[in-house]
Amino acid sequence: MKKLARNSFFVVIITILLLFLMLRKDYKTIVEAIVNSNKLFLLLALVFYFFSFAIDSFSFYMIIRRYTHNYSYSNTLKLNIMTKFFNGVTPLSTGGQPLQIYELYKNKVKLDDSANIVVQFFIIYQIAVVIFSTIAIIFNHIFHIFVKNLFVKKLVILGYIINLVVLLILFLISFNKDFNFKIINFFINILSKLHIVKEKKKTIEKWRKKCDNFYKSAMTLKENPSILIYGTLLQILQLIVLYSIPFIISKSIMKTTDLTFITSIVTCTYVNLIGSYIIIPGASGGIEYGFIKLFSNFFVEPFILSITILWRFTTYYFPVILGAVFFNIKKKDISDDILDK
């Protein structure tokens, strides 16, 4: 619990710092643009976010249904919104998965099955992200949406490579669990000799369990291709809806803009590739930088800063706050061991 509170406090401090940096030049114009924004478009942006969230939750629920019929879609929605809070206040969005496993186990889903459900969901999401990112990169290569910026281009490529490598590792584990565990064991032994890994046996056992879970989950998906296909399509659909939100928000600030529905999706894909390897909770700092740099092709200051603030509130701060509310209602039922992971 202390760790979660510390992370939440850190997010608040980072948020205040980011707002100061964005508002310091022309805060009156930025705030005025937000205050005078078209509230119907802002409401539509929230509707799009909840639609994306509902699709994402249904993709998760579809996997859960293979293991139990006693966990409703409404429960999945509640769990997913709490997951947004845990992911939002932990580095690299790692806090949500232990919560998901615990909540499923608490609802009489076997521990191994709970872990497999969460892993399958991660694999499907990762496949969707790589497919979607590949399409976005090809689209930009053909139509040249962005002004050439070598530094930002390198950040995007790095994000794409990281996501692709993660997916390739998942596939490698899927085909040869024992071989991959030997590789992991080899590296743990090296790190142990360098005194980077202190508890060698505990670390090896931890990674052995992870390899087992990934292998079992991958085998389940291979044996049930319909779940893999439908799940991936659902995740691609939710990414389309989620990445179109900047276009809607821009309409609330500016009556005319060069940004289109398609270019919003492609640009936002690039932004999230940059944010995928930022260690700070919520990818704060890096994702705002990427958003401003990439969307500045369509907007000028100070309007780009107003749009950035509204976009981050809609897609990050609002769901994190809502998740925190749900968590505080249910936290008496959640183990402190989960809260401190």
Image (cartoon, helix red, strand yellow):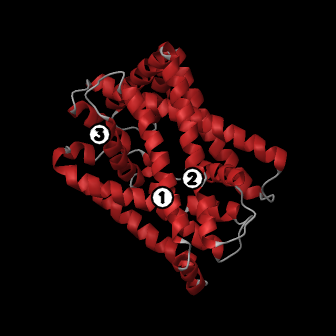
Please state which of the two labelled residues, at mark 1 or mark 2, is closer to the viewer: 1
Residue denoted by label 3: 75
Q: Earlier in the sequence, mark 1 or mark 2?
A: 1
Q: Secondary structure at mark 2?
A: helix
In screen coordinates, is 140 left or right of 132?
right
User: For the point 60% across and 40% down, which residue is it?
Assistant: 162
Residue denoted by label 2: 275
Q: CA distance from mark 1 to mark 3?
A: 21 Å
Residue denoted by label 1: 46
Could you tell me residue 177's position as x and y percent?
48, 17
Is residue 272 among what the camera can see? yes
Q: Nearer the viewer, residue 29 or 254?
A: 254
Amino acid residing under circle 2: Gly
Q: Secondary structure at mark 3?
A: helix
Task: Give the class, few, some or many, for how many residues have Cα within 10 Å of label 1's Cα (few <14, many ≥20).
Answer: many
Vertical comparison of 15 with 58: above or below: below
Amino acid residing under circle 1: Leu
**What is the quadrant of residue 318 in the picture?**
bottom left
Tell me whether circle 1 and circle 3 mark residues in contact (CB < 8 Å). no
